[in-house]
Amino acid sequence: MPQLGESIAEATVIRLDIAVGDEVRADQEVIEVETNKAVMGVTTLCIGKVSEIRAVEGVSYSVGSLLGTLEVTQEEVERTGVDTLESLEAKNQSQPQDDGKGEEENLHFALDGDSYEEDPSIIPSVKGLPVPTGVMGAHYISPRMRARMNDMGLREADISAVVGTGAGGRVTVEDLERFLDYLEAWPSAPASPMRLAVADAMRRSWTRPLATVGLPVLLDRVLDHRRKQSPKPGLTLYLLRAFALALKEQPMTAGYLIGERVVHPRSFDIGVAVQVEDGVVVPTLRDVDHKSLSELVADYDDLVDRARRRRLTDQDSSGGIATVTNFGTFGLTFGTPIPLPNETLILGIGAGKKKPVWSEQTETFLPATEAEMMLTFDHRVVDGGGAGLLLKLVAALLQEPEGL
Amino acid sequence: MSVTYIDAIREAQEKLLREDERVFLYGQDIANFGGAFKATKGLAEEFPNRVFDCPISEDAMIGLAVGAAIEGMRPIIEMQFADFSSIAFNQIVNQAATHYYRTGMPIPITVRLPSGGTPGSGPFHSQSMEGIYAQYPGLVVVTPATVSDAYHMLIDSVKMDDPVLYCEHKFLYRWLKSKSINGDHLPIGQARIARPGKHASVVTYSAMVHEAVRAADRLQADGWEIEVVDLRSVKPLDLDTVLASVARTGRLLAVGEAFPWGGVTAEVVARVTEEGFHLLDAPPQRLNARDTPVPYHPKLWAAHRPTPESICDALRKLLLF
């Protein structure tokens, strides 16, 4: 098996194009092999006749493995300098010679042919790293690598871009430093504390199996209702209130899994995502299940206002069981929001769009305002069915805004 | 003209006898016979009444040495084989090791322990006792691996006020040669880098330094650069040099010729894990003799102790982790 490229240690034989007894030219493609990078042909080194084929289709061979032998004339051996079975044998026998430079000589152990045999599984087939293919990149992080990452304030997510050259494709400290050197040439600036806080929350949340489901909801009734109110509740507040009432009916869906226990909601305090400069904050509206929309408006407006001015206290952002995000305010219609790391659910809503909707009563298409609702949930706690039920409940509640 | 390891030991004793009248030699058949390994050849004639044969009682030998040290002498005791020092164990660990702590009076004795295996020496003439003595507070345990260290460390051992177990490797006696003895030398308690490298550190001592260097030579052909640290003295243990080496390489293999349960290699691995966990790219490894008495047959013996082959094998596993 020839060296087919840098960092390739083995290749799989996919087709043998020769049989024993075939005459071959020099540089004739005789075996097709596949590496983790490409399909390639293995070519003959000289003119000859196939005397033995050791390679088997479908089997991987490390670089340097003997795939077969050719019967070759002496002149051809001399002309091309190919290895013969005898010269290979001689190479394998020879040991690196002592250079004799050391001042002290150690003459002991003339114990040739010791009974000790090396385990063939760990003899590298190529010089350099005998890396098994297909496992490049961060997987196991050694204590040394971990300590270096801690020094630099890096997390696992930060080294996902680094291709490992260590044993087993592992990312080494040298790989990391090479990557950081490469990044030196790019413009960069320190991340803001807000950015880092969001990054940390999202990183922690992303360790869970999150899934997102969606359902369209008609908003006309909510918009009608809203027009008649003073002060006017925001659309997000309608959603917040409907979400709290739905969760109260299905409290299991807001459960938080820790170890082998599910922690249930203590009160129906719901967070709302507020975009601020370079990040997002999530103040929590209290007892959303107990208070009517009109009772909630003042608290909600105050929280959002203080959030935008970055005047929230820790208390304002704690204790929520789920969050609502209205990405429709950015003109977006679809999204897959990520819940806070300490919450199981986040409910998002996209921008409303005028659409023709079929009316059974009038048997015509009537204009309606429709938006997509998205619910992302921790799939360890909630399943698609439970999430769907919750979304349908919210959609139904929004059709009767007077009850909110 | 070259100097062997045992020549260095003899010359160090000659120099000590010549320069310090408190020094005397005591051991079995060391006077007119010159010692079982001829480490004291000619010294009895050169220094009359300072090189004594003793009865076949290791217990009595160390007891006498402790008494002489209390009276201000600096005896060098030759055990015929390190293995036999077990008979003097009480005198070494209970008397010599504790004396300074009990009385404030130091016991400057040096016990020469012909240690380690040679082909065909069998279970009673091959053992490595350094790990046992290193366990005891109050004892210094040195394990020279080179001709120059054999010379200078014996002199430094005798000059030291603590009781020293000087573990000289029998295999190196006549096999290891040097053109001359270096003038410069490191103090006891300081390790040296026997061979620099960057992919893994082999921490070892005594004859295993040479086996490790040979293993490193072989792996160089595969592109691996192995650093070999010669501890020189196993107690005190120069952890700074060891940690600095592991900091360079991220991988540790501790190699020793003694039995595998506990001992010097276990201590090295434990200390590096405690203080240098953040330096490690792979679990630190140990390679020792097998957990059986040392076998007689040369081929069994070669399979019992670490060899360049088994060190290469262990290193490859470590490098691939």
Image (cartoon, coloured by chain):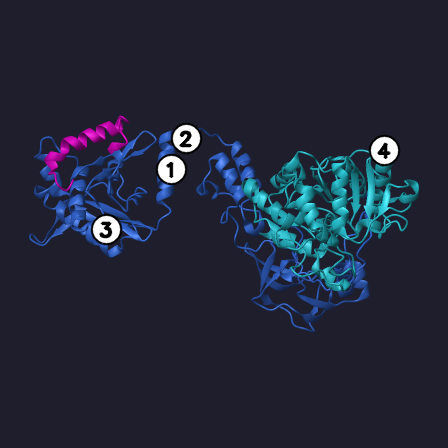
Q: Do callouts 2 and 1 point to residues on the same chain?
A: yes
Whether residue A307 appears in magenta in the rendering, the answer is: yes
Counting residues from the start of the chain, the first of labels 2 and 3 encountered is: 2
Q: Are the residues tagged 2 and 3 within 8 Å (C-beta)?
A: no
Residue at which label 4 appears: B19
- Residue A253: give its label: 3
Number of numbered tags placed on the structure image: 4
Asked whether A292 or B132 is in front, the reply is B132
Give the image location of residue B103, x and y in percent: 66, 35
Q: Are the residues tagged 2 and 4 within 8 Å (C-beta)?
A: no
- Residue A191: give its label: 2
Q: Under tag 3, what secondary structure?
A: helix
Alpha carbon distance from label 2 to label 3: 35 Å
Asked whether A403 or A317 is in front, the reply is A317
Whether residue B218 appears in magenta in the rendering, the answer is: no
Q: Do callouts 2 and 3 point to residues on the same chain?
A: yes
